[in-house]
Image: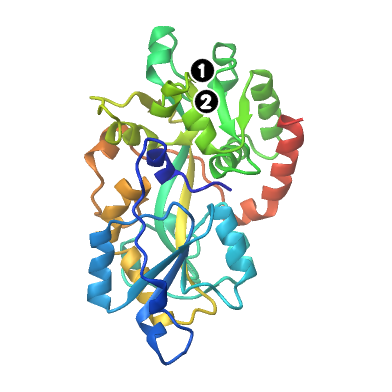
């Protein structure tokens, strides 16, 4: 899986993500000492929060937050599973629906029904009966297009998966390796949801014949191969279609230098797969009280409204405001492809194996 790249969209444009960490010497493993005042969050490298927002939680709760980031989301989940008997922290943030069953089947989390969960839409509550994880954010993996390229070539940008295999779009798309990248995996899952068990392989044969280019990860695809991004323009990239996020166009506006008056990129709305991201209280957390308080904070309004411009994801609670740039340039997909986590768990590894032999060989 990928470095969770909602925030890497911005990182590719030169943004440095704010990651707030408590000092490590605040935490000790002696049960009766300072450890009860420190709560440790384990996450992927793209965790980001505004310093003042985290300070508000620390002040109101009395807990000092220590953050441990551990590679991309897939790496971080796997390490958390391997260390679950003696976990690195109290709360894990960053497991999404593509990896959720792996975490749950391995007993990574203990149940906790977060305060404020009634404000979270039911569509995001994929473990509603058991409360082992709490939904925190969502985003859509979608094909992005370079508006200038399509205007210059007097060609309508694609709007659907079906469009991508048409001759007009030959040699235009770059995607990420489904075995090594979360957006790459999400795009594969989107095609499996769209065309079903019997149809997705045939679709990918056509996509390959139509010149799809596959690279290892999002950073390379978006910032080196995609002609519509700030990085791609500098690299003289020649692919005007890329698998990225619905929230990538607002990032191009917000972090553009000079700031463009409108987004230089658009989203093919019929190519989206919904990703939901969760936090959970680790099974053997040393500070479960602090962990519960931290999860409550993550679905509180202050954090939920802080997320979009830090991690380029959408809040899950009702009534949370999103930045105007999101509404204008990066609205969430109206009808994204989705898939039951149990189906993903059952078929993901075989799909990736089949995809690898089909597309990369």
Q: Quadrant of residue 346?
A: bottom right
Quadrant containing the C terminus is: top right
Residue assigned mark 2: 225
Residue assigned mark 1: 238
> Vertical placement of 50 versus 14: above or below?
below
- Badges 1 and 2: C-beta atoms under 8 Å apart? yes
The numbered mark at residue 77 is none
Seen at 23% across and 50% down, the residue is: 321
Seen at 43% across and 31% down, the residue is: 269
In percent of width and height, residue 184 lies at 58, 39
Q: Is residue 123 left or right of residue 258?
A: right
In percent of width and height, residue 326 lies at 29, 39
Pick the front one: 199 or 4:
4
Q: Is residue 316 left or right of residue 272?
A: left
Q: Secondary structure at mark 2?
A: helix
In percent of width and height, residue 47 lies at 41, 55
Q: Is residue 84 left or right of residue 139?
A: right
> Vertical placement of 361 versus 240: above or below?
below
- Determine if residue 86 is in view: yes
């Amino acid at each position: 899986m990928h470095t969770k790249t909602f925030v890497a969209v911005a990182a590719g444009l030169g943004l440095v993500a704010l990651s707030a960490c408590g000092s490590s010497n605040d935490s000790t493993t002696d049960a009766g000492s300072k450890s009860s005042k420190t709560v440790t969050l384990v996450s992927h490298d793209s965790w980001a929060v505004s310093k003042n927002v985290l300070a508000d939680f620390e002040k109101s709760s009395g807990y000092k937050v220590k953050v441990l980031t551990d590679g991309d989301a897939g790496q971080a989940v796997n390490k958390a599973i391997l260390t679950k008997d003696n976990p690195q922290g109290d709360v894990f943030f960053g497991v999404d629906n593509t990896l959720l069953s792996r975490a749950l089947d391995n007993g990574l989390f203990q149940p906790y029904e977060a305060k404020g969960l009634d404000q979270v839409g039911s569509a995001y509550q994929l473990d509603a009966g058991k409360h082992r994880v709490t939904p925190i954010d969502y985003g859509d993996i979608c094909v992005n297009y370079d508006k200038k390229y399509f205007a210059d070539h007097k060609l309508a940008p694609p709007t659907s998966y079906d469009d991508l295999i048409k001759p007009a779009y030959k040699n235009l798309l770059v995607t990420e390796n489904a075995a090594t990248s979360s957006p790459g995996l999400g795009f594969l899952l989107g095609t499996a949801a769209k065309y079903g068990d019997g149809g997705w392989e045939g679709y990918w044969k056509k996509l390959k014949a139509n010149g799809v280019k596959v690279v290892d990860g999002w950073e390379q695809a978006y910032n080196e191969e995609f002609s519509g991004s700030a990085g791609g323009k500098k690299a003289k990239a020649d692919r005007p279609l890329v698998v990225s996020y619905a929230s990538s166009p607002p990032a191009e506006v917000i972090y553009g230098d000079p700031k463009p008056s409108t987004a230089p990129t658009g989203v093919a709305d019929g190519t989206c797969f919904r990703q939901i991201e969760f936090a959970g209280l680790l099974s053997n957390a040393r500070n479960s009280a602090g962990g519960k308080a931290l999860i409550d904070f993550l679905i509180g309004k202050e954090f939920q409204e802080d997320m979009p411009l830090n991690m380029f994801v959408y809040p899950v609670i009702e009534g949370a405001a999103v930045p105007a740039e999101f509404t204008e340039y990066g609205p969430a997909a109206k009808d994204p492809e989705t898939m039951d986590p149990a189906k993903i768990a059952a078929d993901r590894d075989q799909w990736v194996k089949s995809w690898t032999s089909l597309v990369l060989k």
